[in-house]
Image (spheres, rainbow, N blue to C red):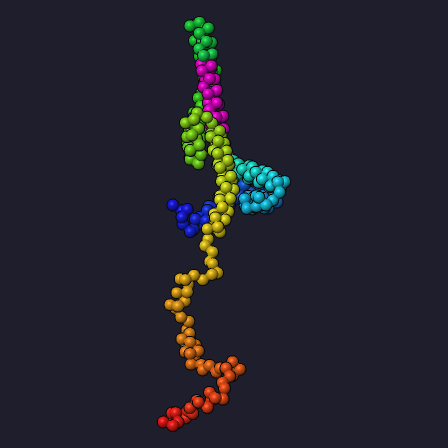
Amino acid sequence: MFENSKHFSKLVGFSALSIAGSAAFFSVFGLSKLFAGAQLAVIIMAGSLEFGKLVAASFLYRYWESINIAHRIYMTIATVILILITSAGIFGFLSNAYQGATVGFEKESTALIYKQDRLDQLEEDKVFLKEELSAAVAELPENYRTARRKLREEYQPQISQINKDIIELKGEVGDLKIALVETGVEVGPAIYLARVFDTDVDSVVKFFIFVLIFVFDPMAVIFVISYNVTLLGNKKTSPVRSPVSTDSDITTKKRWPVYGEKERLNLKQDVELIPDTDDLPEIGEDKIKKTPNVHKGGVSGR
């Protein structure tokens, strides 16, 4: 569809610029997050390396046959290593973005797990106290009503406190679950995929990050090389005008005369040519005598 268009090379160039620019942005800021102690220096270094990587890929494609083998091997290895560094920077950027989006979610999830465990522990304590109270009351004779009442009075405040704590924890657990629903909207797709594949959210996100980094920067380099291919192809297929004029050019020139050309032709026709006397043949005296005299009115003697 686009390969026959005269703007196809521009389209390839724009695609290469957009993908390479996005990859460079993610890589530079991802590396700056990995080396947070010197962010500005890392941004300058990574930016220059990204630009040099694209130029190196173009240089290798254009001058592969012209450079020696050592030069060729070094630039190829350097370009591949820079692609890996860019991929590492993209991984750092995306993982940092994921962690930033899930900080609140992780805090609330941890608090929910803690409170849920505490709630289960209180439920177990409540059951244990009731069982202990029942066992203590059962050991007393039936006529020891006062002792049984005292046992119940001893255990009842503890059971009541546990019931109160359970009610409070259930309210806090409910609030945390509501907050998790609101916070989980940002990482909702990852949570859904984790449930589908029966795994944790971190594994799902890690998988998608690796898929992106293995496609992102290599695609940018390939597009830069493709842009060079289209540029060299346009130079080979561009028509070259021949210096020799063809018949069509001649007819064209005849059909469209230059202004003032006719006047110059008329002037050339009106010019009277004067012969050179040295080039004229010699005529004898006898021939001169026979020649009649020509006057203004005509030949004399008529």
Q: How many marks?
A: 0
Is 126 magenta? The answer is yes
- Residue 38 in view (yes/no): no
Q: Residue at x 50, y 86 (%)?
A: 284
Q: Position of residue 199 (x, y in %)?
A: 46, 26
Residue sticking out furthest to the bottom: 301
Is 293 magenta? The answer is no
**Left or right: 74 with respect to 142?**
right
Q: Residue at x 44, y 21 (%)?
A: 163
Relative to 238, say whether 275 is above or below: below
Where are the magenta residues, as a range?
Answer: 108-130
Question: In front here: 23 or 68?
Answer: 68
Q: Residue at x 46, y 20 (%)?
A: 120
Q: Position of residue 208 (x, y in %)?
A: 47, 33
Quadrant of the image for the N terminus? top left
Question: In front here: 77 or 96?
Answer: 77
Q: Position of residue 252 (x, y in %)?
A: 39, 65
**Left or right: 5 with respect to 28?**
left
Quadrant of the image for the C terminus? bottom left
Residue sticking out furthest to the front: 286
Question: In front here: 86 or 137?
Answer: 86
Q: Residue at x 40, y 62 (%)?
A: 248
Residue sticking out furthest to the right: 70
Q: Main secondary structure of the magenta part?
A: helix
- Residue 214 in view (yes/no): yes
Residue sticking out furthest to the left: 302
